[in-house]
Image (cartoon, rainbow, N blue to C red):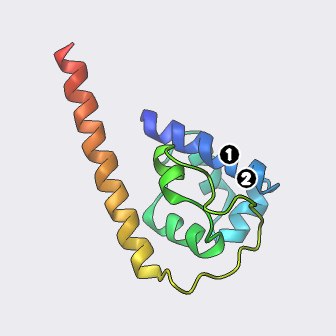
Amino acid sequence: MEHYQIDQGIRLKKLMKVLNLNQVDFAKSVGVTQPNISKIVNGESSLSAELLARMADTYNQLNLHWLLTGSGEMFFDAVPNKNFPANEAISVSNTKERIEELKDIIEKAKRTVNQLLKDI
């Protein structure tokens, strides 16, 4: 299992706890199946661009950068809730572009860490 997948799973579990949702209810809220969420929470699978886009649409105050990397705060707004108001300024295409940028950052970081480990 990739370490970043495990970390993402831990953060997804924290998110569901803050939202007071179990895996079934969270999966329904973003339009995926519970087994998909379970695999992510257990570190067996990573967050897909499609799932991240769905999460951004459903929970638009969710900080995807935090979810992917652990940096920053969980939410852009201090008071999280299940029904965030729609943010018209952020389009789905911009969200998908940002997700791809974050995935590139993660891949570069993984390569850097792997190189550092080889150098030790």
Residue at x-position 17% and y-position 17%: 119
Identify which residue, 33 or 118, lies in the foreground: 118
Q: Residue furthest right?
A: 20
Identify which residue, 99 or 84, lies in the foreground: 84
- Three-letter amino acid code of the residue under disc 2: Met
> Are dots 1 and 2 in contact, CB under 8 Å?
yes
Residue at x-position 75% and y-position 60%: 79
Residue at x-position 51% and y-position 84%: 89
Residue at x-position 29% and y-position 46%: 107
Residue 117 in percent (x, y) is at 25, 20
Residue 34 in percent (x, y) is at 69, 58
Identify which residue, 69 or 23, lies in the foreground: 69
Residue 54 as seen in the image, left or right of residue 92:
right
Residue 85 in percent (x, y) is at 70, 79
Q: Residue furthest top?
A: 120
Is residue 11 depicted above or below 91 in this figure?
above
Q: CA distance from mark 1 to mark 2?
A: 5 Å
Where's the C terminus, which quadrant? top left
Residue linked to disc 2:
16
Labelled disc at residue 13: 1
Crowd band around label 2 with a 10 angstrom C-alpha radius: few (<14), some (14–19), many (20+): some
- Three-letter amino acid code of the residue under disc 1: Lys
Q: Is residue 1 visible?
A: no
Q: Residue furthest bottom?
A: 88
